[in-house]
Image (cartoon, helix red, strand yellow):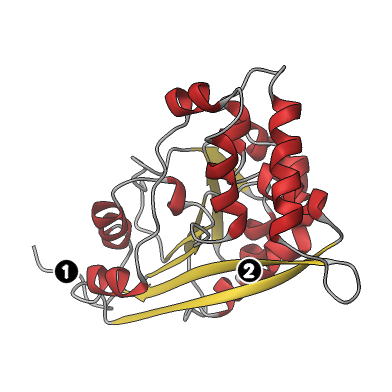
Amino acid sequence: MTDWDPYLYTRFEIERTRVASDLLARVPLTEPRLVYDLGCGPGNSTELIATRFPKAEVIGLDSSPAMLESARVRSSGTTFALADATTWVPERAPDLIYANALLHWLPDHGSLIPRLFRALAPGGVLAVQMPDNANEPSHQVMRAVAARGPWAELMTRSLPSSYDVLRATAYYDLLAPLAVEVDVWRTVYCFSMEGAADIVAWVSSTGLKPFIDSLPNNLRPDFLAAYEAAIDRSYPARADGRRLLDRPRLFIIARKGADPEPN
């Protein structure tokens, strides 16, 4: 997959940052010393963390050089570094690992989530938010359009594997034996979009990106046109002519005990 596009991602920054802010608001810490923003993107979430915890050392991590470059411009006083969350291990145990809209891209949550939690310092918090959009029209239409047309065979061969977000109860069961407190909840945000083209722009920077990247340049316009037409049918105009884009989000807050784990 090609690198991420910070400009396209931040086109809807107000809506995306609202979700990041809701996750941060539930973090039960007052003065953490070390915080990692795992999958920091263009730095909007890192900026929120640094504002809430001004005495903390805040480090933004991402696997995208383009996103990191954008983040450094935005927050010149914050440390940002290249890292792959699939294998990342912190050099020092942090008080907060904050992962907003990242982990749904990664496999094997049964191992990944406990591993991240165990990396925390005593009393530390794991804060996670993941889109849970698999059953939404925006994502069902992606697969349906990909399965028909001149691109169908190519996409079948080249699309990367997708990783389903587990049920909230599964994450609770993964973390409850390890944590002193686990809070899981699901929220559906209803974002107002001007039209079908805005919905396409929204998902082009996230879930639709692997579909677009799998196509040669000559097929992309026709695929996007077919996808937009299907989106136009799936999200009818509301009373004011705008479209409502439902974005379900799964949130997890898990707090570690204050005492070190026994050897």
The residue at the point 76 percent across, 50 percent down is 10
Q: Quadrant of residue 156?
A: top left
Q: Amino acid at mark 1?
A: Glu
Circle 2 SS class: helix
Label annotation for residue 261: 1
User: Label 2 belongs to which residue?
Assistant: 19
Foreground disc of the pair 1, 2: 2
Q: Is residue 89 left or right of residue 32?
A: left
Q: Do callouts 1 and 2 mark residues in contact (Cβ within 8 Å)?
A: no
Q: Quadrant of the C terminus?
A: bottom left
Of the pair 155 and 83, the residue shown nearer to us: 155
Label annotation for residue 232: none
The residue at the point 65 percent across, 39 percent down is 67
Q: Quadrant of residue 182?
A: bottom left
Which x, y percent locates residue 164? 39, 54
Q: Amino acid at mark 2?
A: Val
Return the disc, 1 or 2, that comes first in the chain's sequence: 2
Tell me if residue 201 can be seen: yes
Dot 2 crowding, Cα within 10 Å, few <14, some 14–19, many 20+: many
Q: Quadrant of residue 169?
A: bottom left
Which x, y percent locates residue 106? 40, 46
